[in-house]
Amino acid sequence: MVSVILSYGLSAIVGNRTQNSRPLIDAPVADSLPAGTTNETFLQREYEGVVLANSITTKAEYLKVARTGRGTPLSRTQRKVVWTLLQSAMQTQAVDGKLFWPTMSAVGAELLRIQRDRSDRALFDHVVVDEAQDFNAGHWRFLRACVDPGPNDIFLAEDSHQRIYGQPLVLSRFGIFTRGKASRKLTLNYRTTKENLDYAVRILNAAGEFTDSAGETDDTRGYRSARSGPNPQLLRCATPAEEFDAAAAYINYWLDADEVHEPRIGVMCRTRGQLSRIVSGLADHGIDAVQTKDAAHASGEQVAVMTMHGAKGMEFTHVILMSVGRDILPQPFRLAGLSDDDRAAALQQERSLLYVAASRARDALVITTVGEQSELLPEV
């Protein structure tokens, strides 16, 4: 059977305690773990990238498995402690029946495997996957179980630079092979201008190496655009009021400048907590902006407001990234207590998120900040 873990199970055991505050392990034992491993981020990545990816259900299996790509080494004794934490979440939360999304996919994969063993063929002949960079181990186990291995069994499109969820996974671990002639790299961008693309790529340049689904380095060499346009603008504002004045001025200019082709303007921010403030601030300037994360809804609005995550897969003629400050992107609390490897991965994911947001702009890109700008922003 597939191991069961709950959506809030990992956060419940951070600090070595269950929800009813009973200690799970002695403090001296917990102190023996490497720095940065007793937090939700490390435990979640360990569960998805090691336990779930390798179909591990027992401590004996966990003690023997290779922790490929996890960075922070664990001794046999330390693995026992980590397993105690993970197993506690599996056992104490299972009674509520709330599964991790990756676990749901893995359970589905196991059901499909059993069904395949009892029948003559898999459920599907072919599978097509988009946005593959954000899939987790449970997803890949499920997709592999959907179709038998063979020519053209799985077609997938991915961009490792847009990985804003999850962690890198080498698909050969799941019986999916993408090396050599099985893959092709696309480098011509038809959406955004050369100027916007160049700026977005510069966001990635300091992020370190990106790894694709074959386990190989995925760089940005050869990326080019079919169009040209205005240079991106970075506005450093002294106060929130000044920032809204600037954003409203740009939006009104865009709305008035093109009477033939109606502009579609996307205003994006890092957190959900910023959304209502932005909508209200623009309304104070006479701009009717609509908060949405639905692509169909956004396409019908002149000015749509959403988080950077919510903008994934969308495009706009004009984009404003608002309040991209030093304490907003990355958010300091998301990096606190992480190991060096997990911190580097989190920073790379934040750069990918900023890259995704910047590349939503078809024609014009404007970035605003109050006070110090984010360290992830290149100069313009």
Image (cartoon, rainbow, N blue to C red):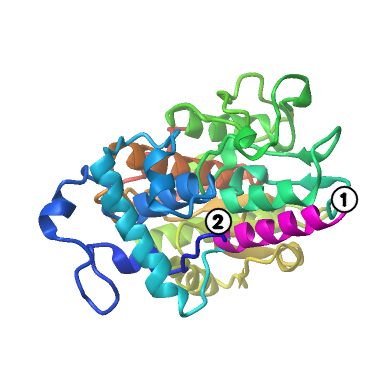
- Main SS of the magenta segment? helix
Nearer to us in this view, 198 or 99? 99
Q: Residue 44 — which label?
A: none
- Percent coordinates x, y for residue 117 in the rendering: 78, 53
Relative side of 246 to 40, left or right: right
- Percent coordinates x, y for residue 82 in the rendering: 30, 52
How many residues crowd around disc 2 within 10 Å: few (fewer than 14), some, or many (20 or more)?
some
Q: Which residues are magenta?
A: 102-120
Residue at (47% x, 49% y) in the render: 51
Nearer to us in this view, 212 or 84? 84
Relative side of 224 to 161, left or right: right
Q: Which corner quadrant holds the N terminus?
A: bottom right
Residue 118 covered by magenta stretch: yes
Nearer to us in this view, 235 or 273? 273
One can see residue 93 in this view: yes
One can see residue 371 in this view: no
Residue at (36% x, 53% y) in the render: 43
Up/down of 156 relative to 316, above or below: above
Dot placed on the residue nearer the N-terminal end, 1 or 2: 1
- Percent coordinates x, y for residue 368 in the rendering: 45, 50
How many residues crowd around disc 1 within 10 Å: few (fewer than 14), some, or many (20 or more)?
few
Relative side of 144 to 16, left or right: right
Give residue 114's quadrant in the image.
bottom right
Q: What kind of element bears circle 1?
A: loop
Mark 1–mark 2 Cα distance, whole angstroms, equals 38 Å
Residue at (44% x, 52% y) in the render: 47
Q: Residue 309 — which label?
A: 2
| Residue located beneath label 1 in the image | 121
Residue at (53% x, 44% y) in the render: 54
Which marked residue is nearer to the observer: mark 1 or mark 2?
A: 1
Relative side of 211 to 340, left or right: right
Given the image, on which type of amino acid does mark 2 rest? His
